[in-house]
Amino acid sequence: MSPRRRATAEKSRPSWFWPLAAIVVPATGWFAKIEISGEEHLPAEGPYVLAPNHYSEFDPLILAVATWRLGRAPRFMAKESLFRVPVLGDALRATGMVPVARAASAAAARQTIDQAVALVEHGRGVIVYPEGSLTRDPDMWPMRGKTGAVRLALAGDIPVIPAATWGVQQIMPRYGKLRVFPPRRRVQVLLGPAVDLSAWRGQSTPGALTAATDAVMADVSTLLGRLRDETPPAERWNPAVHGQKETGRLES
C-alpha cells in the first residue's frame, strides 16, 4: 500500500484540487498500482521543486496522484499560452499552476524570480520535468535536461527533489496508445534526497545552470537505475548531438 502522510493545509483546505482528486485518483487507480518509496524526502511543508524522469504521456498522472497521497497538492509548470485560454486559464491560476518562462530574456528572468518568490511565500511545490519533453533515449533513460527547474530553484533557494518512475510504459508506451487491460499494473515511484546545488547558489550564468542541471539529471538517472536494477548510461542522450528533432517540447 502506498504511504499516506498527514495532509498539509494546502490539501485539507477546500480547493479545486478536491473535485479533481475525486476524479483523477480513482481513475488512475484503475490503471496503476502505485508503490512509493523515499516518501520522507518530499517536504511535508514549504516549497520544493520535484524533478522526475519523463517517458510516457501518462506519467504526469502518476506523479500527481503520488504527490497527493503524500499530502501535497500537485502543481505543474504549464505553457504560458494556456493561461490565456478562457476557463482553462482560470482553473490553472486557481490551482496555483506555474507558467513556463519560455524566452531567454530579462522579462523571463524576472518571471522566474517572481515564481520562486510565490512558491516560497505560499509554501507550495511544483513538479517540473527537467527534460522538457518525453525522453528520446532509445532505452528510455533520462536525456539531457533543460535549465528551467534549477533556475526556479536557485532563484528562491528551493530544494530540488529528484524522482523516478518506472512501469508506466506498460500502461501507455512512449508515443503509444493507452492500454486499459489488464488493470492495476505495477508502477514504482522513487524519491531521492534533495540535490546538492550549494556549489551554484547565487549563480545564474549559463555554465552554472547547465552544471546544476547535470547534477539533477545524474540523481534522477541514479534513482531510475535503482528501479530498473540497471546501470544508467555514462552519457545522457542529447537530441542536438544525436540529430533528433525535438517536438512539442517545453522550453527551459
Image (tube, rainbow, N blue to C red):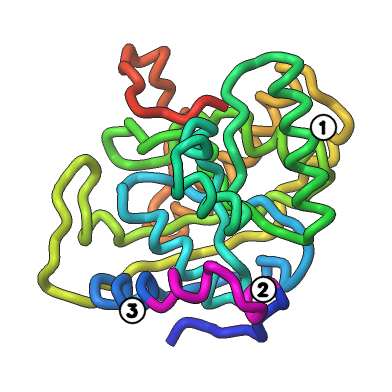
The residue at which mark 3 appears reads as 26
The residue at which mark 2 appears reads as 40
- Label 3 to label 1, Cα distance in Å? 41 Å
Residue nearest the observer in this picture, 147 or 100: 100
Q: Earlier in the sequence, mark 3 or mark 2?
A: 3
Spot occupied by residue 41 in the image (x, y as percentages of width and height): 67, 67
Tell me which corner region of the image, top left, top right, bottom left or bottom right, holds residue 169. bottom left
Taking the magenta stretch, the answer to whether it contains residue 157 is no
Does residue 51 appear anywhere in the picture? no
Q: Which residues are magenta?
A: 10-22
Q: Secondary structure at mark 2?
A: helix
Specify the label residue 200 is tagged with: 1
On-image quarter of the N terminus = bottom left
Q: Quick one: label 1, few (<14), some, or many (20+) residues within 10 Å?
A: some
- Label 3 to label 2, Cα distance in Å? 24 Å
Tell me the amino acid under the disc marked 2: Glu
